[in-house]
Image (cartoon, rainbow, N blue to C red):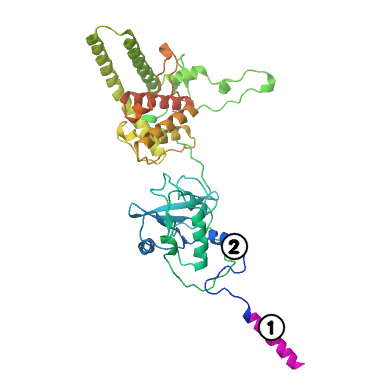
Amino acid sequence: AVLLIQIGLFVVVNNIMAAPVATGGQLYQNVSDEEARTAVKERPPYLHGKISRQEVENLMRDNGYTEGLFLLRESSRTPGDFALSLIANQKLQHFKVSRRTGQYRIDDGPGFGDLDALIQHYRHPDDRMPVPLANFCSRAVTPQERTIYEDIWKETAAPSTSSVTAGVGAMQVNTPAMQVNTPALQPRGPMAPSQPASAIPMATEGAYAASPIIRPDGTVVNPNPAPTPSADPSSGAAPTMAAVGDMEEREGFRNIPRVKEWFDRDDAIAQVSLKAKEEKAVKLADINGESDRANQHAQQFSEAALAEEKMYLVWLNDHLEQKGQPQVEDLGDSIKNAVPVLWALVSVSEQKAPFFHKNPRTVPQEVDNWSILFKFMKKLDIPVEEQGEGEDYSPALDADALHKADRREILKLFSRLLMYEAGKNPFPY
């Protein structure tokens, strides 16, 4: 009996020792192909740990330092965030990948639920990347992991992108067997909640100081009156002045010197444009006389526009400062790409910024920004097209002229933006 027990134990131990183990880099022997692919995608070979920029530089050079070569690494400064390191224009550049509201994104780009989806997106041309991601720089992985992800990478190859070999096959390693149930990479530390855009504080001193509103009868109105409860709709009573707006107070608002100047300037611009149209339609025979009159109009317009430009420049830089954007020196070449104007309108409207080219590199992108601005203005009911007749005539804005920094078009544009701000906040001062 003792002999039989010993023989039985020997058989059991021998069977255990003969069981298959993960050797030779075969990590996923007892799982399906789909499970293995999912595990590799959760921590793809291009995802490195907390490595320094110098280590990134060395890895890139070891892998050829080719255009579009990249890797993703954990941020050493912000737990839970990552950094995308990329070779573009023969230089190593770094881009922050942040995790907000459960999604990964670069700057204000689209959000993705996992890192691999973000990487696959930027394999295609995008304004936020100087070049598309072409191939990756792998960390030390088993040959099986490398083969699995190489197949995934080829299946999702971006158009006009050659097959990836440099980044994938560059590192030959002999790693020991690894655990199958390796947990997916989780963000470290609490995730910072997204913050809503803060309201722009109104100035109380200087050029934007509060001014009293004067009624036609001479009484002074508080620019920030306390809210008045509206009438009960069920009572059948007419809405209160607070509900429909006090027309006299609005007229008083127009009497504020600086606001009145905005309206007067816009009227003057419209009248000059209308008069030029009328003179052209008449086709006066005296060409010299017509030229003299045009020169006189241009001189008068130039004198008025000079003061107007200074006021608009102060207004623009004030809103750029509110959005944390760089100041501009003039209303000419500094704004021909429309970027400062778009940021200013986002500040005024307190609306979400539309997608636009924040760093336009070509003329078509600059022109496209003006079209985006016009659509944004129409959404906010700011006049863009030609409107009205006679004294109510409002000329259309010309995107091509604005891109060429035409002075008249720029003044027309800014007068409407300031009028929008005045109408949006009847008592902002």
Please, which residue is most extreme toward the left here?
288
Q: Which kind of residue does numbered mark 2 sit on?
A: Asp
Please, which residue is most extreme toward the right here?
1
Q: Which mark is residue 12?
A: 1
Residue 107 or 70: which is nearer the viewer?
70
Q: Earlier in the sequence, mark 1 or mark 2?
A: 1
Give me the residue at 54% from left, 21% from top: 245
Coordinates of residue 369 in the picture (x, y in percent): 40, 34
Extent of the magenta region: 1-16
Most common SS among magenta residues: helix
Quarter-of-image position of residue 230: top right
Give me the residue at 27% from left, 21% from top: 302
Check whether the beta carbons of the residues at disc 1 and disc 2 lie within 8 A of each other. no
Give me the residue at 49% from left, 68% from top: 143
Coordinates of residue 276 in the picture (x, y in percent): 32, 14
Q: Which kind of residue does numbered mark 1 sit on?
A: Val
Q: Which quadrant would the N terminus be assigned to in this image?
A: bottom right
Q: Which residue is mark 2?
A: 33
Give me the residue at 47% from left, 27% from top: 378
Q: Is residue 358 left or right of residue 19?
A: left
